[in-house]
Image (tube, grey):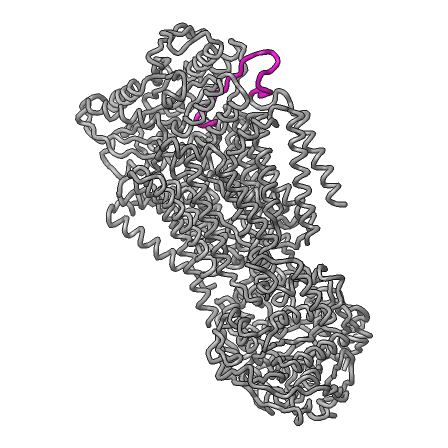
Amino acid sequence: MRLRGVPGPALVLALLCALATAINPVFLSPRNLTDMLLAAAPTLIAACGLMLVIASGEIDISIGSLMGLCAAVAGTLSSPDRLGLPPSVAVAATLALGLGVGLFNGVLVSLVRVPSIIVTLGMLSVLKGANELLMSGKWITRLPDGLRVWGTGSLLGVPVPIAVCGAVVALAWILANRTAWGRRVFAVGSNADSARLAGISVERTKLAAFGLAGLLVAVATLVSVPRLSVVDSGVGVGFELLVVTCVVVGGVSIRGGTGTILGVVIGVLLLSSVRTVLIFLQLGESSLYWERAIQGALILAAVMGDAAGRRKEARA
Amino acid sequence: MEAKRLLAAATAALLLIGGCGPKEGGSAPAGGPQSAKGRITICLLPKQKGIPYFTSCAEGAQEAAKELDVELIYDGPTDGSPEKAAAMVEKWALQGVDAICVSPNDPNVLAPAMKAARQKGVKVITWDADAPSDAREVFVNQATAEQIGTALVDTLVKDMGGKDVKGEVAIITATATAANQNDWIVHIKERLKAYPNLRLGSVVPSNEDQKLAFQAAQDLIKASPDLKGILAISSTAFPGAAEGIKQAGKAGQVQVTGLSTPNDMRAYVKDGTVKSVVLWNTKDLGYLTVQVAAQLARGAFKGTDATIKAGRLGDKKVVGDNVLLGDILVFTKDNIDQFHF
Amino acid sequence: MRRLLATHEACLAALLAALVLAAWQADPAFVSGRVQAGLLPQIGETALLAVPMTLIVITGGIDLSVGSAMALASVLFGLGFRSGWPVEACVAVALAAGLLCGALNGWFVTRFRVHPLIVTLGTMSAFRGLAEGISAARPVSGFPETFLGIGQGWAAIGLFVALCAAGSAVLARHALGRQIYGIGLGEAAARASGWNVDRLKASLYAFSGLTAGVAGVLFTARRNTAKADVGAGLELEVVTAVVLGGTSIFGGRGTLIGTALGLAVLHEVRQFVGWRWSNDVLNLVVVGALLIGAVTLNGVISRRPAGSVEGG
Amino acid sequence: MAELLRTEGLGRSFGGVRALDGVDVEIAEGEVHALCGENGAGKSTLIRILCGALAPSEGRVLWRGAPLPEGVHRREAAGIAAIHQEPVSFPDLDAVDNVFLGWEPRRGPLLDRSAMLRRTREALRELGEDLPLGRPVGELPMAQRQMVALARALVRDCRLLILDEPTAALSSRETEALFAVTRRMRERGVSVLYVSHRLDEVFALADRITVLRDGRRVDTVPAAATDRAGLIRKMVGRDVPATPDSVRGTEGSPVLRVDGLSLPGSLQGVSLEVRSGEVVGLAGLVGAGRTELLEAIYGLRRCHGGVLVGGRPVRPGSVRSALAAGVALVPEDRHRQGLIPCWPVAWNVSMASLGAVSRLGWISPGAERERAEAMARLLQIKCAGVDAPASSLSGGNQQKVVLAKGLCLSPRLLLLDEPTRGVDVGAKHEVHQLVRRLAAEGAAVLASSSDMPELLALCDRIVALRGGRISGELRRGEFSEPALLSLILPEEGAA
């Protein structure tokens, strides 16, 4: 698969890091790199799930509120102040919730035939409401160590979130490139009619993609929320916009059918590093306000690059 | 044919929702404006619903409401947007409630709605944060900005080991529009002049988002090596900043203090990341606010009186048009367990 | 095709009537003219933005950047005012900024043939980022009383009614309206009929940007604040109203009367829930469920074939 | 040889049109069986039924005596593989995926990627092709896409390989490789159903040849027992219906002048002229560039070279300037480009000429309805009123609506692309009469069609296109189907 649209963002990422290192070498210190990876891990885990949904020709903008709800459920179940159940129960319940909501979205999109942007737009609001109702104004302050280890623990010296993220990326790559279902997701996105003729169930393929995306949002929540000792109801606000941006900048076409895991990794690293680079450039704290503008510019640049690429092909 | 069946279903569903809506649903019974029993209705509007600081204030308010046999409505925007808060003030004014207590996230946005409500005969007061004086009768103030600013700086200096410690201090605030925080920052800068060896570094916003405060704390530590102390002056920023310092392994080297509830900070005080937490008794603040609003609505208290009998709090001083709660609390390892809000 | 349209509007009108009836039964004060008049300005900006959004969605496109363009216009208005410009000049700058934002969207959609969802997703971040950058997230307020007056009044609602009436007439009887439907139903046939498809699409996006500019100014007048987080999340609310009104996200179907009814249902549901239970959280669940429910019913009525996010 | 596949009384009709009528065909194991016939004789319908993409109206298909399951995937499993003219695969995926999708070899839960790569490379090498495996197939030229489709068939040892016009887009080297593969398939006992206009290829490869005409099987003969002329006579069969040359309009001044028109990949330096009152036919195989030429003149495609209508140049790539110059196009894809099916007839008719029925853009429904009804009467469009949706009309009447749409502009030049495709015989005749009448009234007509009898009946002059170049011209006196056929078929032996 020629890496269409990926060299661009990779170049920009390298440039940004070089610039930041030039001004403040601490940027490349292992400490800072680990911090940046820790910040990027949840986004990357969710981005792998979203990439497969978009590759199948659909979209999911409810993942932000889903993360908020997962955080609320995990906290409510495991915190001694609330139900105080054993952490393993809370983790299992959170993963089940993510998978369940994902499948619900998938059923509405592929079986009831409601456009995916409408289903997930509605769910973005419904899940946010559910999260606030569950938290009912009080934050969850004490999380058991069994849950916190997911966020702050480390495995053979590697922080758990980064280890989990690495595993998810590897699994996603294998799933996308080395399994029949993975190739069928791209086939459905590329040409749904031909896929049906080739005996592929378009509905089941899309349903599974939505389910996986929901599950990975739950995983992303479990590795990010326990890093903080307090679970508040603002978790995940704006997260869906960030993840969609990363996936698009990573070269995944919104029409479906294309996209690489490597591209998504680069897209996530690029978007996540913008904030830290701005701080290291020490342009004063007002520079932090330009972070969102830069993210918008990156999407438009990726889009123009992709369109120019496509026009070149059309002539070939 | 299909449309008719659909029509019938929709009508039935709606009647169901409207008709038998539970009278005691939601956090407080709204019901019509002048409900039968002639009880007065007071609305308590926080900056952002869902933040423990305001939830604990609401508990104090409920307590006062029961004592005064007053109907209390506690609601506010979940995303803290001042526009939505203003819309709620307009709605309540239309409902003809007796009094509205407003904690404005952006006073300029809420002022027009508050003035309009007053013209409709609603008693409007501010609490926790103030608004232009022509938009409200009185301001129930936990403490003056100067008291808060001074307490924050003095506590931080004490935690850092006294006056002669040299180095840089940074501030992590809520949002740039938060009026309270900006007043406190003025007095913090003022107070810092008393400690020449300390230099104020950057003021970083965290937009009521714990993760941002966490990241800001870590970035500040990395960006400026001789950072000695951080002032996290919002109830969401403080826990985030504390966790940031703890995970950066700087607990003890970089001191952090600020404003947050004992419940939220208990873990950090216990493990030594944080030496002291500055705040006030939020329950009492809520209690006092409802007392003032109820007595204003019943005419038992006019803005010009010198003191007010506030139930279990006894007499509270009224300075200018401020009703002062007065006592700033500093929670430390020794006394934090006595407080549960 | 006409009969199909009628059923959706009829259902919506019936739903609205049922809603008002239920509200009256539960709490008569809510339905009084005074209360309704007092609450109406709150939907002003959403209604204004719903007119161009409806036209764009009928052509199979979408514009997620309206909230951000509104914020940019508001911030520019504020900065102009703070540096002493007369209010009229500030308004002109704000409207020009809105128009420019819309033109940029149009240029990207037509010149680069890029999917409108992605273009406006990009410009959504870019415009709001620009607003945050140039204002350093600091609000400006304290505008003159006269200016504040136009916001409290019914400028937005009045403008909406005018645009809605004019738009409905164009959609029903004007060649441009016929072309808007045609582009949504069969862009290839539209191009083969000699219509200037690209120019019409680009001007719709420019119109949407200009309307966002107007909404930004009106909001600043209504709430006496010009800041970067104005209109946050408003685009999703506008899309909800338009889709509730029966406009299909795939294009080719929808009317402005339907959108007006969609706005009314959205507004009444939200205000009633706020009034009856005074619980902002409940609204999140109710409005989201209403959107999915309406589109599912809509799908059941029209039996539209499966389609992906692909529009245009 | 043992019998592999047999059809009994196979029939299929679309709306009023009888595409296939009681066809009995039998293909033996290991046999190369050719299928010939003019366009519209029912070849592609038969193929789509055999490979499971289309269900027959009557009759059944037997596979070694037993009825075949429905559905493309199950028939692929049974051993039938079909390579269509325009292989619609997965443009965004690479060659390996396109070859193996639906049949991926597994190693445990994962794909056996190395085996997939190896077998794809082997199949492509057998076809004499070493195209880059990593690139999305959509970016490959048509010839290589066809090779990927062929590789898909080779990789799964199919029992019956159906090739539909396989060499239309291939170079001579690739055609040779295809012949070699076909012969090797035969040696391995695999049957091949070979559909082609290229009669020399048919004779080079086929054991037996079946000829279809107007949906019926004319004859099945061993290749050795006939020759090129005999086959053409079978394909043509009936006498050319003498069209009443009622009125032969006197040829007026030239309306359309095209010189040196070229379009990368489809047209090379085409020049032709059409005079007022003259009906010029455009003949050629699929892919010869006929649609591209009409669309270039009409401004739908940007091209190099001059297009003059009534002496005035038409801005390339601008439909508006073509319309202004009085050009109207009845496109080939009626449902996508011609009209909007769910719109009422009246709206479709006035699509290209809204100005005429509106003042300052405000359409007057009355004027629009009147004009539509006048057009319906003029063209005898049978419909339940001008408010009925176009989709409720028959194929023929829909075509008339598209014609009416063009006629509203009172065009000087009328471009017709497959005017009677999918139209029943009765309506076909009406359309021809209509075109004759328009020409008589002075309009210049350029009609492209792959239905040769139609061209011979309708046109004053026929220009033949082959591979994007004009390969010759026949005036009315010189008309004969064999002559025209030889002009549009590739020269003897040349690819």
- Residue A218 visible in this rendered orientation of the protein: no
Between residues C82 and B99, which one lies in front from this camera angle? Answer: C82
Find residue D36 and report its horizontal and vertical position in percent.
70, 83
Find residue D222 and report its horizontal and vertical position in percent.
74, 88
Find residue D171 and report its horizontal and vertical position in percent.
54, 82
Q: Which residues are magenta?
A: B28-50
Q: Main secondary structure of the magenta part?
A: loop
Please name the residue shown 58% across and 81% down the image. D288
Please name the residue shown 59% across and 59% down the image. C182
Please name the residue shown 44% across and 37% down the image. C219
**Image vertical order of residue B134 relative to residue D278, above or below:** above
B38 drawn magenta: yes
User: Could you tell whether D280 is left or right of C198 in the image?
Assistant: right
**Image vertical order of residue A184 relative to residue D197, above or below:** above
A212 drawn magenta: no
Labels in figure, total: 0
User: Could you tell whether D448 is left or right of A64 in the image?
Assistant: right
User: Could you tell whether B206 is left or right of D350 in the image?
Assistant: left
Considering the image in quadrants, where does the N terminus of chain B appear? top right
Image quarter for residue D191? Answer: bottom right
Between residues A265 and D233, which one lies in front from this camera angle? Answer: D233
Considering the image in quadrants, where does the C terminus of chain B appear? top left
Find residue A113 and report its horizontal and vertical position in percent.
64, 50
Between residues D285 and C86, which one lies in front from this camera angle? Answer: C86
Between residues B156 and C267, which one lies in front from this camera angle? Answer: C267
- Residue D328 visible in this rendered orientation of the protein: yes
**Image vertical order of residue D303 relative to residue A15, above or below:** below
**Image vertical order of residue C307 relative to residue B12, above or below:** below
